Structures are given as C-alpha cells and as structure tokens.
Amino acid sequence: MPSGTASSWVPVALSSDLPSGTVMPARIPAGPLALWRSQSGHVAASADRCPHRGMSLSHGFVRGETLSCIYHGWSYGQAGNCLRIPAHPGLTPPEAIRTVTHPVAEADGVIWIAVGEPAGTPPALAGLVPLRSLAAFAGIAAIEAAAGTRANAAGLLEAEDIRLLLSSAREGETLIHVLVEADASPAARIAAARAAEGLRRKAEDFQKKGAAR
Amino acid sequence: MMKLYDYILSPSCYKVRLMAALTGVKLDLRAVDFHPGLEHRGPELLALNPAGSIPILEDGDLLLTESSAMLVYLAAKAAPGWLAGSDAEEAARVQQWLSFSGRLTASLGGARLHEMLLRPGDIGVLQSQGIAALRELELGLVEQAERGKRFLAADRPTVADIACFPYVALAPDGGVSLDPYPAIRLWSRALRSLKGFIEMPGIHRLHELKPEPQLEAGGA
Ligand SMILES: N[C@H](CCC(=O)N[C@@H](CS)C(=O)NCC(=O)O)C(=O)O
Ligand code: FES
C-alpha cells in the first residue's frame, strides 16, 4: 500500500482468518489494532489499547456483540463506546470512555481499514481470491525486487507465477496476502501457498543486503 | 498409577499433563524442584534419566524420558483416536510433527529459558530459529486447511498437535511474537476449546467459554 497516500484502504487481514466471535491483532501505519468480529458477523477495528490501563485489546475476547479486555473485563461496542465495567456493575460507563475506532470494509474475502478519508470502496481484486497472509521482514521495494515486478497503486503485484496484495505494516515490514484465481485447483492453491515462502525468503535476503550496504 | 516427574512451569511436562487430561488418564504427579533446585540434575533423577531433563514417566517396568513417547503411550492405552489411523499419509504426518516438536523445544523453549531463567545462549539465534519453526508450522496448517483438515495430521487432533502446542503458545515468553500467524491462532483456539483441556501458567482455556462473570459489587 503506498504509504505516501493521505487516504487509502489498507488490507489488514483475510475474512477467513477472523471467524465470528474472535479478535486478532492487525497493523496500520498509524499503529496496532484489535480487529474483531462479533457473534453476528460485524467486523470492527479499534486501537489496540484499552482506555482503562492500556492492555492490548487484541488479547481480549468477544462475547456476543462486544469486545472485552482480558485484564479487568471492561467491554466495548463496535463504535468503541464502553458498555460495561464489571467492577461497577450498576454504573452506566460515561460517554468519554471509548476506544479509537477505524472504518472497516470487507470485500472479496479481504478486510480493509480506512486510513484518512478514502473516496469510494476498496480496490476490486478482479477474479482473484485471497489464500493466506504472511508477514515479511522486508519493505515493499524488497518484495518487488524479489518478485521481479512492481505493485500498482492499490498494492496489487502480479508476477508470472504469483499474485500478491501488499500492505506496509511498518518500516521494513510488509503483510503479504497471497491471491489465486477463483477457480484454482487444490494443488495449485497449495503450490501458491508454498511459493510465497520462497518469495519471502528472497525478499528478506534483499532487505538484509540492502540494509548492510 | 503412572507417575510423572513434573514441573508446573515446564511446557514439556505440561504436554503430558494435557494429554492425560484429554484422554481421561489419572497421573501421580511428583513435583521436581527444577528451579532453583536443579533437582533434575541430581543423583536420584539422573538415575532415571541420565540426560537430566524432565518430564520422566514411570509405569511399572516402563520408564520414558521423551515427551513424544509419553503422549503416544497415554493415547495408545486410553484413547487410540489420538494416534494416527491406518492412512499412510496421516501416520507419516504424525511422525513428522512429533519429530518437529523437538525443534520447537530447542528454539522457542531455549529462548524462553534464556528470557525467564537467564540461561546462557545466543538469544537472537534462538529467536530466529523459533520464527523459522513457527513459519513452518503455519504453512503446515495452511496446507492442511486446503485439504479440509483443521489439525496437523488429520481433521481431528492427534498426539502431534499436543506435542507442538505448548512451546508455540508460550513463544511470547521467549520474546517471539505470535501476531503474524493467523493459521496458528485458529489452531490454538481449536485446541484451547477442546473438552477436557487444562491450563498451565501462561496458557489459558478460551476465555469466552468460561461462564460470564457474576455481577458482584466491589471486586477489582
Ligand atoms: N526429553 C525432551 C526434553 C524436554 C525438555 O527439554 N525439558 C526441559 C524442561 S521444559 C528440561 O528438562 N531441561 C533441562 C534443563 O534445562 O536443565 C522431551 O521430553 O521432550
Ligand atoms: S486494562 Fe482493560 S479493563 Fe483494565
């Protein structure tokens, strides 16, 4: 994802990696997120920091339509508002207690977070479906060098043997989503999952050599 | 009753306690003063296991010093569904991950001992070997999902999953993040929600499966 763009959609995770009733850590350039899906299927993203004492909310748990902190059990709704403080069951938590939330879109099996105020919807994947995500200790330039081709403005990189959607996690770290044709055979899907390992090794090698220079 | 020489904070001992709990076997637990007493390196335990490691499992004449063998023994006695079935690929995958689990012990386990008990070792090397092992496990689980299987060797948990799970779950103790592994996250959830699952310090049953806390005044 071009980090220079003021507003954009960042592909942070695959839908299949976030079943209903679960929470996972994710990352946008602005920092770490707790990405969670309620029991009824709604995805929400909050800064990964509990307003109470700062515990990572991605270590918490989802019950029904709320995200709860593992530490003292404060729970939050999709809009980030605090709904319940177990130590004070009679209290309606004040409006001011809330987490920072980010707009989320889910399309083509990918979960996107809005950074800034992006115009329109996330980029379409044009007949491709996501297979798996993997993190690389390599910047986008090193991955492009390893793949032998450039990513487009939306972060989509199409080489001869592999298709990737790239998302810059932080300096020198990239989240790679591997894409395949929607009608790829099981064998082709497994081959693509494995090929991504080789590409990551190569990219991390380039990154190290680049850093050594 | 089988006797397990055990230490509560040892992931290798926890493998055996967990397998016993999941298969409904009762163990006679003999606590070992691993830290700070180094009892596992004293004469009594060296006589049982010259390698100076725990767990050690005794059942009559049988004396085992390798946790993978203990898992197989418990399963074979009490719940053979945890072993490989007659399928050749499945049998091979069980062995593959049982052997692989030794690499988790050496890398992630080594990093954890270094960080928690200040054991000597090159922490950078241990951590990068741990990351390499986690990446291998992640790919293994991604491939299994493509085959319609949720666990390492089959669509049901086997001894292979129990052999690999504890050191993976405790990777953060050695300074190795589990954030970048979505397949491992889902696998860990599946294991932590099994009927009969038991905890150890640092490894918890799925919180959302616990009963909703009672509303009581006061408290935290
Ligand atoms: N024999 C292996 C080794 C288990 C192992 O590494 N155990 C650790 C405790 S978790 C140990 O006893 N280490 C000896 C030491 O660090 O002094 C097994 O049963 O899997
Ligand atoms: S830190 Fe989250 S509830 Fe206390």
Image: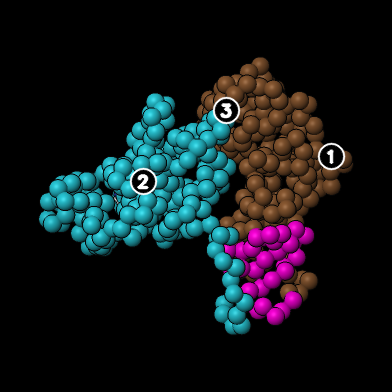
Whether residue B175 sits left or right of residue B11 in the image: it is: right
- Above or below for A44 versus A165: below
Name the residue rendered at 67%, 66% in the picture.
A75
Question: Depth check: B186 or B153 in front?
Answer: B153
Sequence-earlier tag: 3 or 1: 1
Task: Look at discs 2 and 3 and give the one toward the viewer.
Answer: 2
Residue A101: x %, y % from top left:
75, 56
Q: Residue furthest right?
A: A119
Give the quadrant of residue B173. bottom left
Residue at 40% of width from left, 41% of height from top?
A: B81
| Relative to A54, residue B103 above or below | above
Rounded to the nearest angstrom, the CA distance separating label 2 from label 3 is 34 Å
CB atoms at circles 1 and 2 under 8 Å apart?
no
The colour scheme used here is: by chain
Mark 1, secondary structure of its residue: loop
Q: Look at chain A in the picture and name its colour.
A: brown
Residue wearing tag 3: A193
Q: Main secondary structure of the magenta part?
A: loop
Q: Which residue is mark 2?
A: B79
Which amino acid type corresponds to the residue marked 1 in the rendered image? Thr
> Is residue B51 in the magenta section?
no
Residue ID for mark 1: A121
Q: Measure the alpha-carbon separation of dots 1 and 2.
A: 52 Å
**Exactly how many numbered labels are in the figure?**
3
Q: Colour of chain B?
A: cyan
